[in-house]
Amino acid sequence: MSQDPSFYFPAPREQKFCSQCGTLNTNRLLEGDNRKRDVCEHCGAVHYQNPRLVVGTLPVWGDKVLLCLRAIEPRANTWTLPAGFMELSESMSQGAARETQEEAGANIVLGKLYTVIDIPQVDQVHVYFLAEALGPELDPGPETLEARWFGFDEIPWDNLAFRSVSTTLKHYIHDRSHEHFEMHHYSLAINR
Ligand code: ZN
């Protein structure tokens, strides 16, 4: 069975059945709350849905930046900074380092928190850390078709995966020219 990726990605917007007991949920307002929730009337579980955190890095080796060609949807065959959904029981920096290892096999030292990007239309916040590579060796995992170091004048701007990636790279190129790196917090909200 296959569905259009937009059906389930980034996440289902409703939870039809209770994940605790399997009963059909009802969607209703709880007393004292201000929005409808998927509620199990059998066991009482309330299935809150909250935004997800995507954590990643901007790895630099000398005058080159690391990009990964995505093997998976969404945006397969486009270039991205190594990043992915934060897992339970890890910190943001642990998640960012893990994704860099999984997607690129790069040997890095994590640097400062660099961009924090609200994307409310997909219920996500993307966070990128600066990272310094200890060497150019790469060993991409199954979610990456190819991992490669790009000079800052070689970045494939027309084939980047996400606006959080392109804007993070633009901030970095600008800040690098001034040799001053501060944290950037902004929103990619679409006004509708
Ligand atoms: Zn239940």
Image (spheres, rainbow, N blue to C red):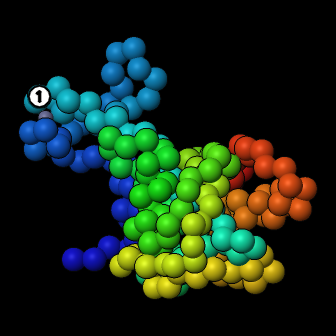
* Residue at horizontal 17 percent and vertical 26 percent from the top: 44
Q: Position of residue 148 (x, y in %)?
A: 58, 82
Mark 1 beta carbon near ligand 1 (under 8 Å)? yes
Residue 68 vertical position relative to residue 14 in the rendered view, above or below: below
Looking at this view, is 138 or 14 the one in front? 138
* In-image side of 175 versus 146 (left or right): right
Residue 133 vertical position relative to residue 37 in the rendered view, above or below: below
List the residue tagged with mark 1: 43
Q: Position of residue 130 (x, y in %)?
A: 64, 55
Going by the picture, which residue comes out furthest to the right?
178
Secondary structure of the residue carrying tag 1 is loop
* Residue at horizontal 90 percent and vertical 56 percent from the top: 178
Quadrant of residue 18 within the rendered picture: top left
Quadrant of residue 154 within the rendered picture: bottom right
Q: Position of residue 159 (x, y in %)?
A: 65, 81
Q: Tell me if mark 1 has few (under 14), some (14-19) or many (20+) residues whose alpha carbon lies within 10 angstroms of its own.
A: few
* Residue at horizontal 38 percent and vertical 76 percent from the top: 141
Going by the picture, which residue comes out furthest to the top?
32
Looking at this view, is 13 or 104 the one in front? 104
**Callout 1 amino acid:** Cys
The picture quadrant for ligand 1 comes to: top left
Say whether residue 192 is visible.
no
Residue 25 vertical position relative to residue 41 in the rendered view, above or below: below
Say whether residue 152 is visible.
yes
* Residue at horizontal 11 percent and vertical 28 percent from the top: 43
* In-image side of 127 versus 76 (left or right): right
Q: Quadrant of the N terminus?
A: bottom left
Q: How many marks?
A: 1
* In-image side of 126 versus 170 (left or right): left
